[in-house]
Image: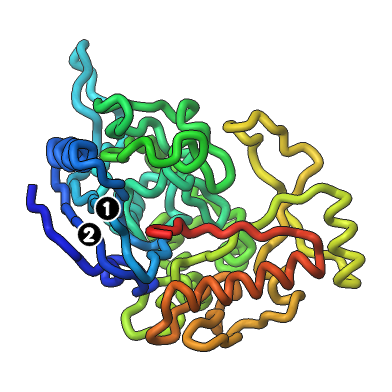
Amino acid sequence: MLLEENKPLAPFTTLGIGGPARWFVSAASEEEVAEAASWAHEHGVPLFVLGGGSNLLVSDTGFPGLVLLVALRGISAAAPADDHGQVAERGVYRVAAGEEWDAFVERAAGENCAGIECLAGIPGTVGGTPVQNVGAYGQEVASSIERVRAFDLQDRRFAEFTAPECEFAYRRSRFNSTERGRYVVTRVDYRLTPDGEPTLRYADLQRAFPAGTRPRLNEVTATVRRIRQSKGMLMVEGDPDCQSAGSFFKNPVVTEDELRRIATAAAKEPPRFPAGRPDAATGTENRGLAKVPAAWLIEQAGFPKGFVLGAAGISSRHTLALINRGGATAGDILALRDRITAAVEARFGIPLEMEPVMVGF
């Protein structure tokens, strides 16, 4: 285990913001993950687990403990044989947490296994996908994850969780809610559908592939990336709209009464979408609830694409992306966040929830 000191964290994040880690370790094996966790425990310092850095806002003062970069690599196209010598069927992938997510999506699509094709172009690593139940364009990883393996920082051992045990809900799981900070994900097993049909629920995909067409999965992934790039949601080097943490705000889930209040305040009906599956963590049914696009609320509150506040701003292509225009600090991003959330709540009575994880605050 190579322990580094005062390691700059900004280069490890897509926002390009943040001070140094007091200590830093890149773990390429489960043994190194356990060793780093033990070191932090023995020295009484806080531990933060870093993956692809695509959903983070790091404090300008950095992190005062140990940052553990999960760098485990490897993809197996089928799980090993079980006790009876049976090998998992085609479509089951066992993926190390440090693998690049988009590369795995492309591999699965190239091998004609459906289930994650609409999640192409999302930055970050595989280990982060179950934590926040990554979703986009009509799919969530919750529908394809079969098992998650993680190191339990409390019990000091490795544990495995089935999909129901992960308690998936909209942008959440047990790993970022009821047991936030307890586990370090080291591997995720996905069960995809060999020769399956692509998911074409999202309006832009339906326009690209009209009813009756039968696109290949890699045609869908390519189209999803083009859509993401048109909205500034694809990481492209040199593109100022891409220095962001992706969607900065979650789409709020609201009641019918709240929908009516929003419509009255805006003098028009807001767009709305189904709220999705029941919340597994709380048991709350989503009956009678709907999702309203946070981007629509933000624009109606007076913040258009391209809005600028000092060195921070809103992407010129997507209202949900807060960007580092060059030299922005974490304080600059938070000042813009606070201005937006205050305006939305003042006009509609709806609090917006920040999606990126805050580190070192």
The image position of residue 82, as x and y in percent, is 22, 17
74 vs 207, nearest the viewer: 74
The residue shown at (23%, 23%) is 87
Q: Mark 1 falls on what kind of element?
A: strand
Q: Residue 22 carries which label?
A: 2
The residue shown at (34%, 36%) is 183
Depicted 312 relative to depicted 73: above or below: below
The image position of residue 304, as x and y in percent, is 66, 82
> Could you tell whether 283 is left or right of 49 in the image?
right
Q: Residues within 10 Å of mark 1 (few under 14, many from 20)?
A: many
Q: Which amino acid does label 2 sit on?
A: Arg
The image position of residue 89, as x and y in percent, is 30, 29
Cβ atoms under marks 2 and 1 closer than 8 Å = yes
Q: How far apart are marks 2 and 1 (CA)?
A: 6 Å
The image position of residue 236, as x and y in percent, is 35, 77
The residue shown at (72%, 38%) is 286
Instruction: Pick out the residue farthest to the front.
Output: 44
The residue shown at (53%, 65%) is 247
Identify the residue under disc 1. 65
For the C terminus, the quadrant is bottom left
> Could you tell whether 313 is left or right of 282 in the image?
left
Q: Mark 2 falls on what kind of element?
A: strand
Q: How crowded is mark 2: few (under 14 residues within 10 Å), some or many (20 or more)?
A: some
